[in-house]
Image (cartoon, helix red, strand yellow):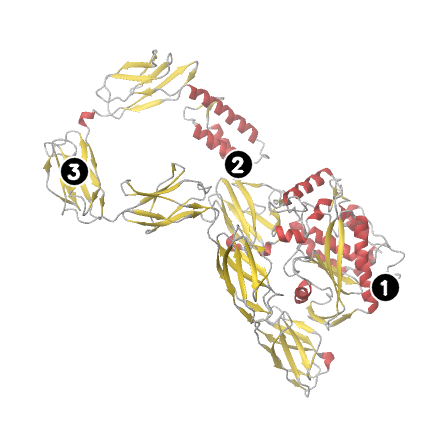
């Protein structure tokens, strides 16, 4: 019986084997970080429960049954146009139709009888219009691409969890699309079953000696494949490998028991001894729910080295990757794959919010290739092409070697920290250790060492660093201030160490000689056995001999004098303009001024003040900052949290550097490189709308020229930025883009407002196929903000389908009429002597059609026209067909 079943189902197995190859690679959990509610609980909560149930082998039924909605389409007349063989015409009789209903009832009965977690709701429909499909040789199972237009016509998008397509197949067989749901299958899963009455003993009614019919067994097989596509656990049973789990075929019921155990999570894995399959909580996550809430799932880290195997990432809060990672093939990148929604990912918008950590190399063949380039943490986003959803995963790049080196570098030996160890060094080491995953065995030991270093630093900080009073090369006394009773040790420039105990005021005075400017003196203090950090001071020159010069800004058209101050033995000064030295003047006391009106004329003049001693020896040369009367100003744009990454704006005047101050903390000054525009990266420092933010502009010499507040807001006024035209017969959705505070959109057709839908991520996609039927319809897209107020509207341009069809000449007796079509033509029909044939043929991807005509016995005298139809079967264009003998 096993051999007979295998022989009959050979085509089914061959097709399904391809699916299983995909499953073998992609079988993982779909523990996404996204989700809204699943029957009054969060999606994340469902995933947590699934993980716990699998770990604890818990099969407690759900408190309520989950309804799964099925659309069963039974095709009664199908012509399979084979690539290299004659067409195969398959039809169903009235008894066959009755038997198809028997199979549907059988499927529902056996599932609900054995599984306390689901209700099966089947909408059974017979499609009696003859169809022609192009197929490979000997493949007589309907694939979703062959009936895409019919699915669009018959199946409302998102109305069902699974579609089953049945057609005549004496040997049985079946196929499952290797995704949990897809657009082509109207947001549902897809299984096809070859309807066969072999082994039936009470046809067309249910057999009296069998629990299920043979075709029901095939339907259960394909349904197991579909549930496998959800990828909610790491390893499902092998649908084609029942014997691996010690099952044998039942002469009356095939592999029914294996399939039912699969669907209730009761297959024993011989490797682990644990029960695997579909656990109760997994039934909640229907294709409809996943499509609405988790557009991308089944994330896997693949091609891991050293036999590690694929790793589920959806359930992981963070994915940890070593900096020196190489994959199975020795390449320095890691690979992410997705079992659901990979084809909807916009590869051009995959991004990391910290490009210092990872680099996205490419996204090809539905595999993302990412290279670690630095230590740290980043979010990696995979947005969909329609902008409605983004799969986000936190990536942590770590380096155990660097963490170990940083921790060990805190210590001189054992538990004694180095003099150079400070809070910054400890924080750096802590950051590196925090990045390590808990699977790193040394992490706990490294953390213990950091804690030791923290305690040692706290103890040392309790003994403060002493203060050395300033000392010049002419001084003979050195004063050091510390703690009362502390032993203060001083190291002189020649290496001599002297020490004293600090008095009641905490000071100790040392006599010193022969000091030289530039030499360094250090000091520490020790009390209660703890020695402080080292203080150091540089010996300065005798201040009576030091010459310093300052200059004030000189504004052309406003100032007449260059002004400033000086110290030291200055007797004269002059100014130099663009390399030309002007008159020297005598000076008596600081401050000074030098008449420069008419001498410094433009802001680009290079001007210096030069000082001299009484012997005309040059002392100092100091630059003067020259300005025009144009006021240097900054004009910042508002910053929208969650939208903007940069504070932007415009500047005028002499601003050459600018900085950002947030809540009183000024961040790094950066150069102006895009004047008159500026931008400052602020995504990581501006967090809240209440943050106080200033943008600051500086001159080339560091003087503050302007500072302006930056307006911070959570959102901006909503605006529709674009709306695409809608073509009747081709388009199903109104699509548009927006910016700002827009949360809902509605369509108004001829003045009637339709349902409001939620929108996210700057993209609107509104199903309108059934609402817009004429090019004269007046259609408006209206948007609303988070407060429910109208935000913006846009008139939608409506047009009809267009296209052109041609026909190649045929001869009497030819099997096929072929030709080409352009534009919006989706299928073709034939009109012979004024009568339109019921059979249609669908356009192929390359714009060519192939219509079976041999059975029509066409003659040269017949008036034959080929008709191009759009997706709604509206006639677009016709062309005459020439027939010759």
Q: Residue at x 37, y 50 (%)?
A: 649
Of the numbered discs in the image, which one, if any, rests on residue 610? Answer: 3
Against 312, residue 754 (above or below) is below
Would residue 104 be found to the left or right of residue 413 on screen? Answer: right
Badge 1 crowding class, 10 Å Cα cut-off, few under 14, some 14 to 19, many 20 or more, is some
Disc 2 vs disc 3: Cβ atoms closer than 8 Å?
Answer: no
Secondary structure beneath dot 1 equals loop
Which residue does the numbered mark 2 point to in the structure image? 435
Q: Nearer the viewer, residue 12 or 196?
A: 196
Residue 105 lies, in percent from the top left, at 81, 58
Residue 67 lies, in percent from the top left, at 73, 52
- Mark nearer the N terminus (1 vs 2): 1
- Mark nearer the N terminus (1 vs 3): 1
Q: Is residue 716 visible?
A: yes
Residue furthest to the bottom: 861
Badge 3 crowding class, 10 Å Cα cut-off, few under 14, some 14 to 19, many 20 or more, is some
Secondary structure beneath dot 3 equals strand
Which residue does the numbered mark 1 point to in the structure image? 204
Residue 746 lies, in percent from the top left, at 56, 59
Q: Residue at x 76, y 40 (%)?
A: 273
Which-is-in-front pick, marks 1 and 3? 1
Q: Is residue 325 visible?
A: no
Label 1 – label 2 distance at C-alpha? 65 Å
């Amino acid at each position: 019986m096993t051999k007979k079943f295998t022989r009959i189902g050979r085509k089914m197995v061959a097709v399904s084997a391809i699916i299983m190859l995909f499953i073998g690679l992609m079988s993982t959990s779909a523990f996404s970080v996204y989700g809204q509610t699943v029957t009054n609980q969060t999606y994340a909560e469902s995933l947590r429960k699934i993980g716990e149930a699998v770990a604890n082998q818990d099969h407690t039924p759900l408190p309520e049954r989950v309804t799964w909605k099925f659309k069963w389409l039974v095709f009664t007349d199908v012509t399979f146009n084979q690539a290299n063989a004659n067409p195969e015409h398959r039809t169903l009789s009235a008894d066959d139709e009755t038997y198809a209903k028997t199979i549907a009832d059988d499927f529902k009965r056996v599932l609900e009888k054995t599984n306390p977690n689901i209700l099966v709701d089947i909408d059974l429909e017979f499609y009696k219009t003859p169809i022609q499909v192009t197929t490979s040789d000997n493949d007589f199972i309907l694939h979703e691409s062959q009936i895409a237009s019919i699915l669009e016509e018959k199946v409302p998008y998102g109305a069902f969890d699974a579609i089953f397509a049945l057609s005549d197949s004496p040997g049985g067989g079946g196929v499952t699309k290797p995704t949990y749901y897809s657009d082509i299958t109207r947001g549902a899963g897809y299984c096809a079953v070859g309807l066969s009455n072999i082994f039936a003993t009470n046809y067309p009614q249910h057999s009296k000696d069998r629990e299920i019919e043979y075709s029901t067994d095939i339907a259960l097989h394909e349904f197991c494949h579909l549930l496998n596509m959800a990828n909610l656990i790491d390893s499902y049973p092998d649908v084609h490998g029942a014997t691996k789990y010690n099952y044998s075929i039942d002469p009356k019921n095939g592999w029914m028991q294996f399939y039912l155990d699969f669907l209730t999570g009761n297959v024993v894995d011989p490797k682990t001894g644990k029960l695997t399959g579909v656990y109760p909580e997994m039934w909640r996550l229907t294709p409809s729910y996943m499509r609405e809430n988790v557009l991308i799932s089944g994330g896997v880290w693949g091609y891991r080295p050293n036999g590690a195997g694929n790793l589920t990432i959806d359930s992981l809060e963070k994915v940890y990757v070593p900096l020196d990672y190489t994959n199975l093939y020795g390449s320095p990148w890691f690979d992410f794959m997705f079992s659901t929604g990979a084809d909807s990912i916009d590869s051009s918008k995959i991004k990391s919010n910290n490009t210092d950590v990872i680099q996205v190399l490419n996204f090809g063949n539905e595999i993302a290739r990412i290279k670690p380039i630095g230590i740290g943490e980043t979010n990696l986003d995979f947005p969909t092409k329609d902008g409605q959803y983004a799969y986000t995963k936190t990536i942590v790049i770590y380096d155990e070697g660097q963490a170990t080196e940083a921790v060990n570098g805190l210590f001189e030996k054992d538990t004694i920290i180095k003099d150079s160890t400070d809070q910054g060094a400890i924080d750096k080491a802590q950051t590196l250790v925090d990045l390590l995953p808990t699977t790193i065995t040394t992490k706990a030991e490294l953390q213990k060492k950091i804690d030791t270093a923290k305690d040692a630093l706290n103890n040392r900080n309790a003994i403060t660093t002493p203060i050395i009073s300033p000392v010049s090369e002419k001084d003979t006394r050195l004063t050091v201030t510390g703690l009362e009773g502390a032993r203060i040790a001083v190291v002189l420039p020649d290496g001599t160490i002297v020490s004293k105990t600090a008095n009641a005021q905490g000071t100790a005075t040392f006599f010193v000689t022969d000091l030289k400017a530039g030499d360094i003196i250090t000091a520490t203090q020790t009390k209660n056995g703890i020695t402080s950090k080292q203080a150091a001071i540089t010996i300065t020159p005798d201040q009576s001999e030091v010459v310093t010069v300052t200059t004030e800004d000189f504004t052309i058209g406003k100032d007449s004098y260059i002004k400033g101050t000086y110290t030291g033995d200055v007797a004269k000064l002059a100014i130099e303009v663009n390399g030309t030295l002007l008159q020297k003047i005598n000076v008596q006391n600081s401050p000074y001024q030098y008449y420069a009106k008419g001498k410094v004329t433009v802001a680009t003049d290079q001007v210096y003040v030069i000082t001299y001693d009484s012997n005309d020896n040059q002392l100092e040369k100091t630059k003067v900052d020259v300005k025009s009367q144009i006021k240097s100003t900054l004009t910042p744009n508002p910053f929208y949290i969650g939208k903007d990454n940069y504070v932007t704006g415009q500047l005028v005047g002499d601003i050459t550097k600018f900085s950002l101050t947030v809540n009183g903390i000024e961040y790094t000054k950066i150069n102006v490189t895009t004047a008159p525009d500026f931008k400052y990266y602020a995504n990581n420092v501006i967090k809240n709308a209440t943050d106080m933010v200033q943008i600051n502009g500086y001159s080339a010499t560091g003087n503050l020229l302007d500072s302006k507040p930056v307006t911070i807001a959570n959102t901006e006024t909503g605006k529709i930025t674009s709306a695409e035209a809608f073509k009747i017969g081709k388009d199903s959705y109104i699509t548009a883009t927006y910016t700002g505070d827009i949360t809902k959109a509605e369509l108004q057709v001829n003045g009637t407002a339709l349902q409001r839908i939620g929108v996210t991520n700057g993209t609107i996609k509104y199903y309108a196929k059934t609402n817009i039927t004429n090019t004269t319809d007046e259609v408006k897209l209206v948007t609303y903000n988070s407060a429910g107020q109208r935000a913006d509207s846009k008139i939608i341009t409506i047009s009809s389908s267009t296209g052109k069809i041609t026909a190649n000449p045929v001869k009497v007796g030819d099997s096929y009429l072929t030709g080409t079509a352009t534009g919006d033509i989706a299928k073709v029909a034939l009109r012979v002597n004024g009568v339109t044939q019921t059979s249609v043929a669908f356009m192929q991807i390359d714009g060519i059609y192939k219509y079976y005509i041999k059975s029509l016995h066409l003659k040269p005298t017949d008036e034959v026209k080929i008709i191009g139809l759009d997706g709604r079967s509206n006639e677009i264009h016709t062309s005459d067909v020439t027939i010759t003998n």
